[in-house]
């Protein structure tokens, strides 16, 4: 049997083999992702009954417990301390200036989950993620203006952009909510010497 395969037939055959291999890889990765999601859902924080909470409190009081329930979050003191330190470094890096930054972004930056980040923010900053981001942006902008008075002559749209706000209207409403007065009035007070 003398079979002649032309160049075009060979190309088609190779493409078919590669397509089948790609399809098999795709199916493998989809199955792998589903399995890892199932594992994560089964590893979720377990429900804790009152006796376990009491025992955890007693163990910590005795200096024996490594993990305890804090505000409904099961977190070890070591992990909590590590996250606080990493959060402080992230603050110094001004992660909050990134437009559209989310709780998940911060969790990824800290190498943890959003629930732990929310716990750290509520416990150590005293506010939720969105309020923290808004306040941090306004405080950053005010400190920039105080350090560099030339920024008082810059348009609000540029200042809003510098602070990570998506629009000047969002900047103005957040500024007023944080400082109690509109940005125009605040910056006017800074412009006029006493």
Image: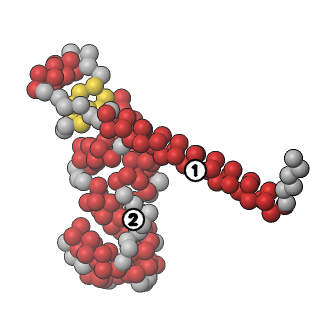
**Horizontal side, residue 68 vs residue 99: left or right:** left
Closer to the camera in the image, 189 or 72: 72
Q: Residue furthest left?
A: 50
User: Does residue 185 appear anywhere in the picture?
Assistant: yes
Q: Quadrant of residue 83?
A: top left
Vertical placement of residue 11 versus 40, above or below: below
Which disc, if any, is residue 23?
1
Where residue 37 sits: x, y (%)? 39, 41
Q: Is residue 65 above or below residue 3?
A: above
Number of marks present in the image shown: 2
Task: Point out the residue furthest to the right here.
Answer: 2
* 14 sits left or right of 31 in the view: right
Residue drawn at 30 percent across, 64 percent down: 134
Residue 12 coordinates in the image, percent (x, y): 74, 59
Q: CA distance from mark 1 to mark 2?
A: 35 Å
User: At x 22% / y 50%, what residue is drawn?
Assistant: 126
């Amino acid at each position: 049997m003398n079979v002649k395969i032309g160049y075009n037939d060979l190309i088609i055959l190779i493409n078919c083999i590669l397509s089948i291999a790609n399809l098999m890889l795709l199916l493998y990765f989809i199955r792998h992702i589903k399995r890892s999601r199932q594992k994560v859902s089964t590893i979720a924080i377990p429900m804790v009954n009152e006796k376990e909470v009491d025992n955890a409190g007693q163990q910590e009081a005795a200096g024996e417990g490594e993990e305890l329930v804090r505000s409904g979050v099961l977190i070890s003191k070591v992990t909590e301390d590590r996250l606080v330190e990493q959060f402080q470094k992230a603050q110094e890096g001004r992660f909050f200036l990134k437009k559209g930054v989310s709780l998940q972004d911060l969790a990824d930056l800290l190498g943890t989950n959003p629930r732990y980040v929310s716990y750290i923010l509520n416990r150590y900053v005293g506010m939720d993620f969105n309020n923290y981001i808004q306040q941090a942006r306004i405080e950053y902008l005010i400190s920039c203006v105080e350090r560099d008075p030339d920024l008082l002559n810059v348009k609000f749209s540029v200042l809003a952009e510098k602070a990570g706000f998506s629009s000047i209207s969002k900047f103005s409403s957040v500024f007023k909510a944080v400082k109690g007065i509109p940005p125009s009035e605040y910056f006017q007070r800074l412009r006029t010497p006493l």
